[in-house]
Image: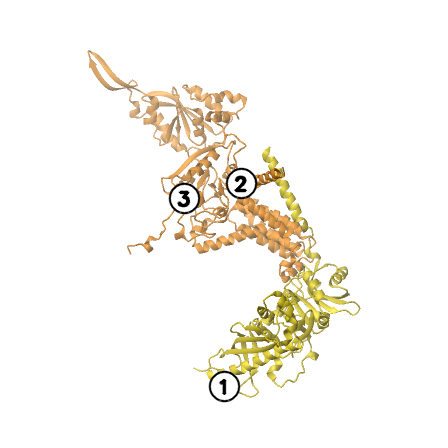
Amino acid sequence: MENSKKKNFFQVFNDFFSYQEKTEYDFTVPEKADEKKENDLNYEDETNKKINEAKNIFPSLSVNLEYMKVRYNLLINSDIVIREFTLTARNKQYSAFLLYIDGMVDSKLINDFVLEPLMLKNRANLFDNDETKVVSEAITNNISVRRIKKFNLLDYIYNNLIPQNSIKKVQKFDELISGINSGNCALFIDTLDTAFDIDVKGFKQRGVEKPNNEIVVRGSQESFSENIRTNTSLIRRLVNNENLIIENIDVGKLSNTKCAVCYMKNIANNDLVGEVKFRLNNIDVDYLISSGQLEQLIEDNGKFSLPQLISTERPDKATNYLLEGRVVVIVNGSPYCLIAPGTFIDFISSPEDLNLKFQFANLLKIIRILAFIITLLLPGLYIAITNFHQELIPTELLFAIVASRESVPFPIIFEIFLMEFSFELIREAGLRVPSPLGSTIGIVGALILGQAAVEASIVSPILIIIVAITGIASFAIPDFSLSFHCRLLRFAYIVLGYIFGFLGIGIGLFIHFLVLATLKSFGYPYLQPYVPVTRDYKGFLLAPAWKREHRADFLNTKRPNKQNKISMKWKYSNNK
Amino acid sequence: MKSTFKKHISLFLVLTICLFSLSGCYNIYNIDHLAYAVAIGLDVGENNSLKISFQLSIPGGSSDSGSSGSSQSDNSVVNTIECSSINSGINLLNSYISKELNLSHCKVIVFSEEFAYTGISESLYTLINNVQIRPDCNIIISRCSASYFLENSKPLLEKLSARYYEITPSSSDYTAYTESVTLSQFFSDFNNTFSQCYAILGGINTDTTHSTDNTENNFDKDSNNKANETSISSKANIENMGLAVFYGDKLVGELTGIEALCHQIITNKLNVCTITIASPFEEGKTISLRLRLKDKTKNKVQLADSGPYISSNIKLEARILTMDENSQYLDEKNIAILEKYANSYLTNHLYEYLYKVSKEYNSDIDGFGKYAVNNFLTWEDWINYDWLYNFKNSFFNVEVDTDIKSGYILMET
């Protein structure tokens, strides 16, 4: 009896602490595409339900016109333009109208290449052959048999009348409207149940500019912009290979935001690509504006503040990861693209690293790791030392701290919270003020406030140094999200250090490491390539450029090697 | 349902484990509420069994609190209490001063000579038992009273007496006139059957305490002093020179600077030092040598019927420091003569030292017991032999081989 009880206990123990693969999920995936479509339309209210029942374009122009007017709320919508005109084809005239959104189209394109060829009566267009064309004619027994080709207005217009490169025949309203919303113009013609979706996009957009937040000394000075096509072209230019696949997936029931999933067909792991596409396809939101939103929607674990997808505004960084075998997701309207999967060390590395000699890059890497530790732990360590472990610091430093605190009225914990809070305040205020005032905030905050606080004996100068070092260290972390993570957890470590001293910080670190070890990004362990150790583990440091033979092993890419064992053939060639 | 249950159980487990394991951490010592003693002095009490002195450092000091705060004044106070034990002394002081006494930054523990003669075993165990006192704080036996010693320790070059105490014993690294003895070393020497303990010999150097010894040789005067005897013209200040030799927990004798040097040669602790010997070339002149160990000193202990026979093979290396225009130290003959002089000088002092500690003090501070133990088959034999008692019967054989190199300048080409 007792034996069985023991066994049960061990089983329970094992169940708690052993790893179990997750098999149950709290959501269901819609099975049929149709259901999804219907779901999508549920947002409409009752009055508009009938409108949405119409799916195909009507043959009658007036019905189409009325339909589009209702669909686009033309009476109150100011920027929708409907241009009705008469179309001349083969000397016959048809009523037609154009529909487009003002500001999103290039009016010169519409004038010169849509309206002009359709309306003007040029010679070829005047030719009238009773709407039929005799293909061949044979007379037998006085009966003439003519093979004629019936005149097809749709094909004629498509083939002969609109000298535009990108033009689609569309029969469904939803497809057409999606085109209009993205800056195309729709052409309806009387008697045809097909409309033309003509690409005349011409809206104003930001060009390719210098990166603002990820600045490097040596390396490209281009950054992504808001337009998805600009961004994909930036990547394509750098990759320069036909194996780069850019797939489009729309996210958001209302906004239908275009997202591009980019990967190298001959490098990236199929499962990874599949997982990214699966997650993007199964997001049930009304709208999506930025990649920051998307990041939160597709990351593995939203409970922890650690970033799980790399976010970058640099095409060269994205391309680098792409060629490593990762997947890049670009969101239309957001100058930051996402890279999956992201592991811890990726957030410590900077795009500069690959441009530098490996010695410099490794030095910087170590400095950044130290910065990470300092920004996370320094205030916590300070409070633990001053409250519990005074014997650990040199006597002179201890006396310096005691002397500096002589006339400070607050306990250290309050002092440290006060300063950390002020620092975060200055940081936030500096970010939110209009840019001409930004430097003022820095001067007021850092210089005047800091010095005045010390002179007024509200805080001790040693603490100012601690907070300043912590702040500077947090700026040395290249990734914005990871820096945020440190800022947040710093407060937890301060509390732990205050309550339990080093023991508390130790336990905090233990839990922190547990979280890091548990976390996965798109199924890849977060601490890769260090934990778990894989085949080509080369230690912590970055190898020299000629020794980077393998792609990251944990990615399980289709091309494990990225360069030959001897990459510098000019040096070690046999011919010499 | 299952997962939430599991979560609650895990949370409960983590919390209970944390609560139990962290329950020892309830006590915060706020840095502002602590008074740090940088030195402790122990004397024989007049009305009570013990007189204990604490040198408390006053960081900052009220005089310059206005300036940015990081300044450290040299202000320190010495409080002396008559009490029955160290811990009751701490208690009494705590009731007197505004802050709580903390010993974690105590750099030296000073015993007065008088106190050390009566035995320091109890105090030693109490100090080792105290969790705040670091094992690496220095032990000084002062030739004056400990409170007088603490009161007169005025740092000459440092601002902070804590640093002064920390750095001063390290002078033995380049003078070898004393040795930096820590509490843990002292305790381990005291507690084993191989060796006896010894401590730094300290004193307050004033004009009246200077040595009046009229030795014939001038050059021997320099190093043949104990603490507070050196002729240094200065205000009263502490001086560490020589070693205090114990038998068990009782002080039995004191060694001079040159004897401390011999001790370090024998125990392989010599880093570098300067000795002065008579010049073999010119009457009345002296030559200074910079000495370091060339090889580890090889000690050997054999047990004869009359007592232990201890032989030491010492290999030294020296550079000539004293120079004049007639020096011809590149000449091998001259060097050989000098080497002979140096060897005989050192051999004499080593014999003197070894017989002093064995015959006069019967205290094996050199740890010859560690070599002697090889001669015994069982631990019981070793204990029955009572090495520490029998050490007085030992006789010695010292061989010194000094390898002298010329000075640093080339005078001939």
Q: Residues within 10 Å of mark 3 (few under 14, many from 20)?
A: some
Residue at point 58%, 48% (across, down): A510
Q: Based on the displayed image, in which of its 4 quarters is residue A573 positioned?
A: bottom left
Q: B319 or A124, which lies in front?
A: B319
Chain letter, orange? A
Label located before the other in sequence (3 or 2): 2
- Most extreme residue toward the right is B47
Question: Which subunit holds the residue at mark 3?
Answer: A
The residue tagged 2 is: A19
Q: From the top left corner, tell me how far across and down residue B140 is, in percent.
A: 67, 70
Q: B186 or B320, which lies in front?
A: B186
Residue at point 69%, 50% (across, down): B26
Q: How far apart are marks 1 and 2 (CA)?
A: 85 Å
Q: What residue type is labelled 3?
A: Leu
Q: From the top left corner, tell me how far across and down residue A476 is, in percent.
A: 52, 51
**Same chain, marks 3 and 1?**
no
Q: Are marks 1 and 2 in contact (CB under 8 Å)?
A: no
- Identify the secondary structure beneath mark 2: loop
Does residue A459 appear in this view? Answer: no
Is residue A112 rendered to the left or right of residue A455?
Answer: left
The residue tagged 3 is: A323
Q: B371 or B364, which lies in front?
A: B371
Nearer the camera: disc 3 or disc 1 = 1
Q: Which amino acid does label 1 sit on?
A: Asn
Q: From the top left corner, tell me how far across and down residue A569 is, in percent.
A: 33, 53
Is residue B327 rendered to the left or right of residue B197?
Answer: left
Q: Based on the displayed image, in which of its 4 quarters is residue A180 positioned?
A: top left
The residue tagged 1 is: B326
Q: How far apart are marks 3 and 1 (CA)?
A: 79 Å
